[in-house]
């Protein structure tokens, strides 16, 4: 016995109706130590499952990367062809009819005024910004913009930029989780190394086997290994993982969802003032892509006159260019939608994986907290110092007061219900279970 339990035994000697002998305390401590060892092994196994989940999904990660890259190339090529044919058509139109250019100069201010008025009636604020953005769009456009629903190109270009930002956020969010899981695993290995004397040799060998997998893993997702630059950004977002995986999950989720919106659904209004199916979406869409105000062209007579002009008979090449333009736009819209679907699938898998990792960490991640503990090999990992009950003969059993030492923490003192007799073979295990529960709550979660 150490000085600690002897001291307490001396204090309680005159008070106790039921005080166990040092040998009985030792036997109970052995029982409890077996339970703690089993829980430690289970936790080590669980943490390795977290690592296995991250490591075994690299193939899925590479496949979706290849798919995204292929779709991106197709989308960008379609946009390039659309922009080239639009530029050629614009030049043709300018040569075609000077009247069209004059009408365009009168159409633009009417369009802007109509757009600002519509936005002001529909939305609470931001009409000035939308007006300036739309004016800039009109100034770099041509009459041809009216003829071909030119807002589509502008919308597709902005969508391409936003999809790029969304992918960056998805990578950043998952990098936070990936790096944190790696830290949990490394800390658990450190704890295992410090306490390996507790384990039998079969467990020790199985843990060190590279392909070891203690129980089947439901493959809900895959890791996204980020570049060093992305890692630096993600670590700036969450520099030190302290085990609060729920907070980490929420932080990563916010990063993953930051640019997620319904922009690819397009405008949900018909251009009539005050007639919007969803005012909030209309306001958001116009702030994001003010070119949508071209839908209001029917409100301006000079814009409508442009639509009545036909230059196709003057230059037969124009029809071919127009067909090329429309085909390219359709392809760009198709690949933009496909890319969006792939991003959504990527996001869903990542969030599912992160959710599974969160649940595993809540159950097993506590073991990583033992990495920096100071192990006292003499006293072991668990020791029941005192057990005291004041029950007298003929009375109902009273609660049992126990004091235990677990890992390197200060002693815990708590009550065991009186209906659990000290003679119960499982008494030491029940005490150890309660001690571990308190350790997780008072030490791990409070850290």
Image (tube, rainbow, N blue to C red):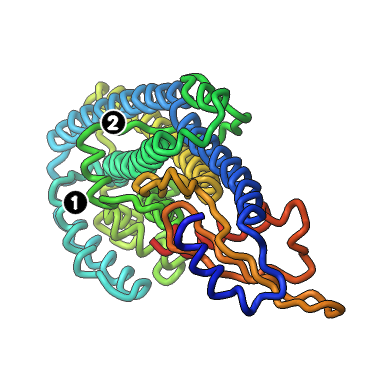
Q: Is residue 68 above or below residue 278?
A: above
Seen at 35% across and 61% down, the residue is 284
Secondary structure, mark 2, is helix
Q: Which is nearer the eye, 84 or 429?
A: 429
Residue 92 is situated, as x and y percent measured from the top left of the image, at: 17, 31
Residue 125 is situated, as x and y percent measured from the top left of the image, at: 28, 74
Seen at 65% across and 47% down, the residue is 31
Give the mark nearest the N terminus, 2 or 1: 2
Residue 223 is situated, as x and y percent measured from the top left of the image, at: 42, 33
- For label 1, count other residues whose C-alpha is less than 10 Å away and answer few (under 14), some (14-19) or many (20+): some
Q: Is residue 306 above or below residue 395?
A: above
Residue 141 falls left or right of residue 364:
left
- For label 2, count other residues whose C-alpha is less than 10 Å away and answer few (under 14), some (14-19) or many (20+): many
Q: Which is nearer the eye, 437 or 98?
A: 437
* Quarter where residue 11 is shown: bottom right
Q: Which residue is mark 1?
A: 137
Residue 267 falls left or right of residue 394:
left
Q: Which residue is mark 2?
A: 79
Q: Which is nearer the eye, 226 or 264?
A: 226
Q: Which is nearer the eye, 59 or 371?
A: 371
* Quarter where residue 143 is shown: top left
Mark 2 to mark 1 CA distance (whole Å): 18 Å
């Amino acid at each position: 016995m150490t000085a600690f339990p002897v001291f307490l035994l001396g204090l309680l000697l005159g008070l106790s109706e039921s005080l166990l002998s040092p040998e009985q305390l030792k036997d109970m401590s052995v029982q409890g130590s077996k339970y703690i060892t089993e829980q430690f092994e289970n936790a080590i196994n669980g943490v390795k499952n977290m690592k296995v989940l991250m490591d075994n999904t690299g193939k899925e990660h590479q496949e979706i990367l290849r798919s995204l890259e292929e779709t991106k190339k197709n989308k960008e090529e379609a946009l390039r062809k659309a922009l080239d044919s639009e530029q050629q058509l614009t030049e043709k139109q300018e040569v075609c009819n000077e009247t069209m250019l004059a009408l365009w100069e009168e159409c633009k201010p009417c369009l802007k005024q109509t757009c600002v008025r519509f936005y002001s009636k529909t939305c609470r604020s931001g009409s000035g910004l939308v007006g300036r953005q739309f004016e800039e769009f009109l100034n770099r456009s041509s009459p041809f913009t009216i003829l071909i629903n030119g807002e589509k190109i502008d919308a597709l270009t902005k969508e391409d930029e936003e999809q790029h930002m969304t992918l960056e956020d998805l990578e950043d969010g998952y990098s936070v989780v990936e790096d944190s899981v790696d830290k949990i695993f490394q800390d658990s290995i450190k704890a295992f190394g410090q306490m390996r004397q507790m384990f039998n040799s079969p467990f020790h060998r199985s843990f060190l086997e590279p392909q070891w997998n203690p129980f089947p893993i439901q493959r809900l997702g895959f890791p996204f290994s980020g570049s060093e630059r992305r890692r630096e950004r993600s670590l700036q977002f969450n520099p030190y993982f302290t085990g609060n995986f729920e907070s980490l999950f929420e932080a990563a989720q916010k990063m993953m969802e930051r640019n997620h919106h319904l922009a690819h659904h397009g405008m949900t209004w018909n251009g009539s003032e005050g007639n919007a199916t969803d005012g909030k979406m209309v306001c958001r869409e116009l702030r994001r892509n003010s070119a949508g105000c071209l839908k209001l062209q029917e409100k301006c007579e000079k814009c409508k006159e442009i639509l009545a002009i036909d230059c196709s008979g003057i230059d037969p090449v124009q029809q071919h260019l127009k067909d090329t333009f429309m085909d390219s736009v359709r392809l760009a819209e198709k690949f933009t939608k496909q890319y969006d679907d792939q991003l959504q699938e990527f996001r869903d898998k990542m969030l599912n994986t992160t959710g599974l990792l969160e649940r595993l960490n809540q159950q097993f991640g506590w073991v990583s907290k033992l990495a920096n503990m100071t192990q006292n090999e003499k006293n072991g990992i668990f020791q029941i110092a005192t057990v005291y009950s004041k029950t007298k003969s003929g009375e109902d059993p009273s609660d049992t007061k126990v004091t235990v030492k677990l890992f390197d923490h200060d002693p815990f003192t708590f009550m065991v219900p009186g209906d659990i007799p000290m003679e119960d073979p499982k008494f030491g295990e029940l005490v150890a279970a309660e001690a571990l529960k308190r350790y997780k709550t008072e030490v791990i979660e409070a850290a």
